[in-house]
Amino acid sequence: MPESKVGTASKNQSRLRPSTRLRSLLSKRPVRLFARFLIVIVTVLLVFGIFHNWILGEIGSFMAVRDAIEKSDLILVDDEQGHWNPFAAANLYQQGFAPLVAVPRQRLSRIEELNITEHKEELCRQVLQSRGVPADKIIFLGQDLKDDVDLGRALGEYAKSQNLKSVIVATTPAMSRLSRSDLRRGLGSQSLTLRMYPVRTRYFDEHNWWHVRQGWVTFFDAYYIWILHSLAR
Amino acid sequence: MIALVALYLLRRPILIEAARILVVDDAPAKSDYIIVLGGDPNSRPFLAADLYKKGIAPTILVCQGKTDNIIEAGLAMTEDQVYTKSMEREGVPSDAIEQLPGAVESTEDEANSLARFLADKSSVSLTIVTSAEHTRRARWVFKKILKNHVTDIRMAASHNPWYNETNWWQDDLGATGVAHEYLKFPFYYVRYAW
């Protein structure tokens, strides 16, 4: 092709209208795929940006099993790592939801064994008594409990011996689904109604956990352990 | 399919290696300070006390912990109080334990608190005591934040009595501890180790 004609052709190409250029660009498969990927990402980000409060709230609410609280035979203070649970259990007792409060005897940590810190159940008892639960209305469940499955077994034995029918479980919002499934696993075939009562803390609950760093850690842990326990079952 | 079967059959060595990657445990050597990081009162203060008794450093530095409702009600101690009590019980004199100023919530906060403490010092040698799975990340953070003050950083890995690198996935605490490290790993690598 003569040089002048080549020059004219390239000039024509560069003079292509933007829409034509875009069409020719999009006719290439990798570009098309990348454009689709971008559209999906942007759409997902937009949807999340608009509905993030609802989405994150639902993620939190899934883990926080919240049952209607009715008169029961016992209030169980579960997961007292969440320091708010004994306070809530004492409130439930004061409102007459159950005549007894049960505290699990968990395995001792090294600093508890060495009496550097108070044992967890002792701390829990002190909080309950300071909030008006009489000493003879506090019972201790099990011994050296490793997890909620162990606690479920101990609860089952006690419920059988005392003919209990229902228990209110004061637990944390993030751990309530996990607690319920582990307690049920420990209870086995025994029929005992568990009414989960996730305790709202001063810092976060299932509706606002994403506002604080500890909320992210707690809900991540809850999902992660719940999945691990489900896989191990 | 074959890969999945191989993964399943080799899961134990893979999980052990996954935890070992996180651990840096240097040979103990004389330092100016031992700093014991917050987060595990069941292992870290005991190793710090052990190192002190072996003459690794004349002073143990402790970071100031945060409070919660039980502590505010006077029913429990703050973490730094627990650390101090544990180390004293193990034979460390109270005047060998020094508290760093300002409450901390993260490894970065702890490194910044130490940087303020060492503001007028240079060429300091340091032994950092923390949980085994936390050692690699902690070393990145302290090396970068303290680069103007510290010439030698040695990591001392403490082990929780309930789990170690060979069984961490069987304990909820171990499983979450290792998972947290892997979640934070990329961010800390880019920010402090790159």
Image (cartoon, coloured by chain):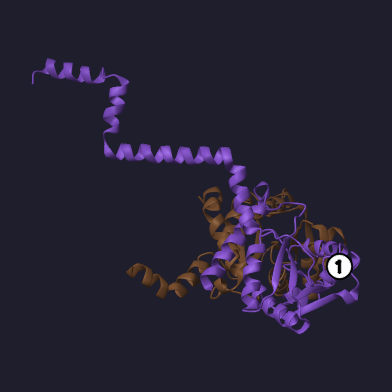
Chain colours: A purple, B brown
Image position, residue A16 (x, y; %): 26, 19
Residue B67 at x, y percent in the picture: 79, 57
Location of residue B89 with respect to B67 vertically, above or below: below
Residue A108 visible, this angle: yes
Going by the numbered disc 1, the residue's amino acid type is Leu
Q: Is residue A31 left or right of residue A68?
A: left
Quarter of the figure with residue B48: bottom right
Side of B49 where A21 appears, left or right: left
Residue A3 is drawn in which quadrant? top left
Q: Is residue B178 visible?
A: no
Count the labels in the image.
Answer: 1
Please provide percent x and percent y for residue B88. 81, 72
Badge 1 element: helix
Position of residue B133 measured from the top left corner of the image (x, y, whole percent): 58, 65
Question: As displayed, is residue B158 above or below residue A216?
Answer: below
A169 and B190: which is toward the camera: A169
Task: Identify the subunit bearing mark 1.
Answer: A
Q: Is residue B161 above or below residue B82?
A: below
Q: Is A128 on the left or on the right of A143, as rendered?
A: right
Which residue is more in the foreground, B147 or A213? A213
Residue at 64% from the left image edge and 73% from the top image edge: A184
Which residue is located at x 21 percent, y 17 percent?
A: A12
Farthest residue toward the left? A1
User: Is A151 drawn above or below residue A79 in the view shown?
Assistant: below
Displayed quadrant of residue A148? bottom right
Q: Residue at x 25, y 20 (%)?
A: A14
Instruction: From the image, tell me which residue sits under label 1.
Output: A128
Quadrant where the N terminus of chain B sits is bottom left
Residue shown at 90%/74% (left/top)?
Answer: A135
User: Between residues A73 and A212, which one lies in front from this camera angle?
Assistant: A73
